Each structure stands twice: as structure tokens, then as C-alpha cells.
Amino acid sequence: MTRIRRSLAALLQTSWRGDLRYLLAGRAVRSVSQGYLAIVVPLFLVRAGYNTVQIGVLLTAAAAGSAALTALVGFAADRWGRKPLLIGLGLATAAGGLVFATTTSYVPLMIAAALGTIGAGGGAGSGGAFGPYYPAEQALIAEHAGDADRTTVFSGLSLIGVAAGAVGAALAGLPRLVTTLGWGTRLDGYRSLFWITTVLGVVMSAVILPVREARPHRVSAGGARPAPLSRQTRGLLLRFSLTNGINGLAIGFLGPILALWFHLRYHVDSATIGTLYLAINLGAVLPYLGVPWISRRLGGVVRTVVAVRAASAALLALMPLMPTFALAGAVYLARMLINAVSVPVRQSYVMGIVAPTERSRMAALSNLPARVFSLTGPALMGVMLSVMWIGVPLELAAALQLLYSALFWRFFRTVRPPEERVPPAAVAQEPAAEEPD
């Protein structure tokens, strides 16, 4: 326990400093909303009278909007700055929550899901590390962290995200509470959560206002546009595009529509699923505390990503074979706790191997294939759930993530980030990103 307390204190002390605290606060607020939206959006649509195919199509629209905005943010952030875009995205989420709170009409919901990324969250244990916020947020955090502390800061970011996501998962029980107390119908309970989303979207924008942003990346020496990506970065981008595209196919089956899978497979409601997601988010705190140590023990970031992704894929393949929700939930919990280790490691790795002036574009473009290929997941899963054995989507996702692990090792085993290319003492002496005047 003493070691855990020391690790937690060191992680938060490193992460919660200067303007990083505002960025981490923004992630926390976003993670609360994604914590319950990943559960309640598909169940709200069931309650509103839509079938699995219609739900899959709407969630595909949400994923498509997320993909388009991710690409747009990636290019715009390097030209105009990351902070204004984070503020705008928070307001878009607020508007999307407002639409879901006031109507059950299919087309307005689809538009709101696409533009506000409502229902496009990363699911349990993601800690809000998903969607168009990603390229602007990741680059801005890397700017303030510096190479020596980058992985530690990303670990702290993920830890705070999953802790806040646990709060959001607990809020998924609100619809049941509303009906139990006689305050309204289950649909009214879902709407109350969408009203909360509107408020949180405004708060997301507000907490970013104090952040200072250095902007040498805004213009190249020759004009108003950023310089083209370097040859080395383009080579890395090609490899990330292939691996992330394969991973995206799997992600499409494992996002918010997974809550629908639990509902259909085991006949559980949002409160029960929320309890599982709460346990996952709370449990993920421990892996995040040990990320720097685990990465060193496994021999670096690439070995860490490959090992934990392969293990989590094997557990995912077991889930559909479980006869009860309790057993399936236990397997999913183990899977997500193992998988949690790879999230900050992979984020830090991408930011570490490219130049600071290319980070937003790299974050956006390297993840764009994942967003694009994930578009097929919800709609395809909706069809599969109506005509095939219910376990097929998860078995397919497990196979894809095993392939991802193999290709990640093949492509990146010789590409090391700065902190693994020089002695740790030397890295520690390097100055962090300069604060703007």
C-alpha cells in the first residue's frame, strides 16, 4: 500500500502542475459524460422504439462525425492552435446533449450524434481518450509535459480519466432511480442525463480558457500554413494507418454498442451495466499507477503495447462463451484492466517519435483510419445481432486485435522514443516545453 500511495502521489504531482491541471480537468469532465453516454445512448434508442439495425446506423453516424472532426481538428490545430478547437468541441457536445434531451426523432438525433459525438465514446476504461478532442489535447499536453515526464503525465491523464469515468458509469443508474422514486419514466431518466451532458459540455469549454499555448507551430517559415510532414513522419504515419485501421475495425464492435450487446445477451439494464463499467473504471486506476514501471519491466513501450493487447484479445474471445452476466463481466473486467496499460503508453509513444510541430497532424492522421474503419462496426454489429450468433462480433474483434498486435511488433520494434534512446538521467536534464510569454 505504501508503494501505491507513493506512486499515486508522484503521478499526480507530475501531472497536476501548471496549465496541465486545466487540461486534466477538461479530460475529467469529458470522461464523466462519456462514462454514462457509452451505456445509455443505445439503451435510450431501444426505449425510443428503434431496432438494432437503426441503432447501429445512428451510432455509425456518430462515429463518422467523430472521424471527420478528428481529421479537421488535426489539421486546424497545427495552423490555428489547439486551445480554440477544444473550446469549440465542448460547445458542440453541449449542443448535441440538448438535442438528445428534447427529441426522439431519428434524423435530428443522427445529426446531433455526428456533430456532438454523442454516443461515440470509447467505452469503459477509455478515460475519455476518444474522438476529435484527441489530436488537439494530446499535442497540447505533450507541449507542457516535456520528454522526461511525458509518459508519466499521460498515465496521470488516463488515471484521472478513468476515475471520472467511474463517476459517469455510476450516473448510468439514474434512469432506474427516476422510475423507482416515481419521478418519471425510464425515458425521462435518460433525458435527465442528456441535460447533464449539455451542462458538462459548457464546463469542458470553460476549463480550457486559462490554458496558455505557445504557437511556434502555427506558421512555417514560408507562409501561413504548417510545413509538410517530414519524410520520416510520413513513413511512420503509413505504418500507424495500417495498424490503427485494423484496430478500428475491432473498436467498432466494442464502443457504446457493446452496452446493447450486454442488454440483448443477458437482459440487463443500464444500471447493471453501469455497475460493471464503474468497476472497470475504478479498477483501471491500479494499472495506470504502474504504467511507467510496467513499461520498463516489459522492455519498452512497443513490447508493452504488443503484450497487453494480445492478452486482452484472448480474454475478449472468451466473453461470448460465458453463461451469465456476472462471468462475462468478470472476463471483460480483466480484459479492460490489462488493456488499460497500453492506452497512455501508446499515446505517449506517438507524441514522442514525431517533431513537436507535427504532433496534432500525426495524432489526427494516425488515428483517422481507426475512426474510418470503426464506422462499419456499429451498423454491421446491428445486423449481426439480428441474424447471427450473438458472439460473432466479439470473436471477430478479438481476431482483429491479435492481428493488430502482430503488425505493431513488426512495424515498430526498432522505433524507440527519445526516453529509450538516451540514459534516463540525460533525459531528466532536458528542459520541458517553454512556457509562453
Image: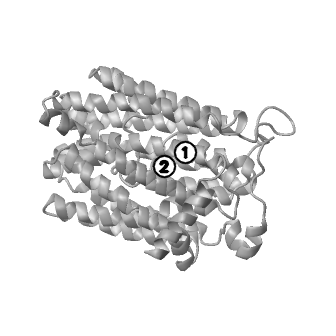
Disc 2 packing (10 Å; few <14; some 14–19; many ≥20): many
Confirm whether residue 16 shows in the render. Answer: yes
Residue 260, position in %: x, y? Answer: 23, 44
Q: CA distance from mark 2 to mark 1?
A: 7 Å
Label of residue 134 in the image: 1
Tags 2 and 1 touching, CB below 8 Å: yes
Label 1 crowd (10 A; few <14 / some 14-19 / many >=20):
many
| Type of amino acid at the residue the image marks with label 1 | Tyr
Task: Report the label total.
Answer: 2
Q: Closest to the observer: 272 or 299?
A: 272
Depth check: give the residue in front, 383 or 157: 157
Q: Residue at x 60, y 67 (%)?
A: 412
Which residue does the image show at 49% across and 33% down from the upper left?
203
Query: Where in the figure is residue 319, as x and y percent of width and height?
Result: 24, 62
Q: Which residue is mark 2?
A: 129
**What residue sits 36% from the left and 22% below the top?**
99
- For the C terminus, the quadrant is top right
Of callouts 2 and 1, which one flags the residue occurring earlier in the amino acid sequence?
2
Whether residue 290 is visible, yes or no, is no
Mark 1: secondary structure: helix
Residue furthest right as drawn: 222
Which secondary structure lies at badge 2? loop
> Where residue 273 appears, x then y in whole percent?
23, 50
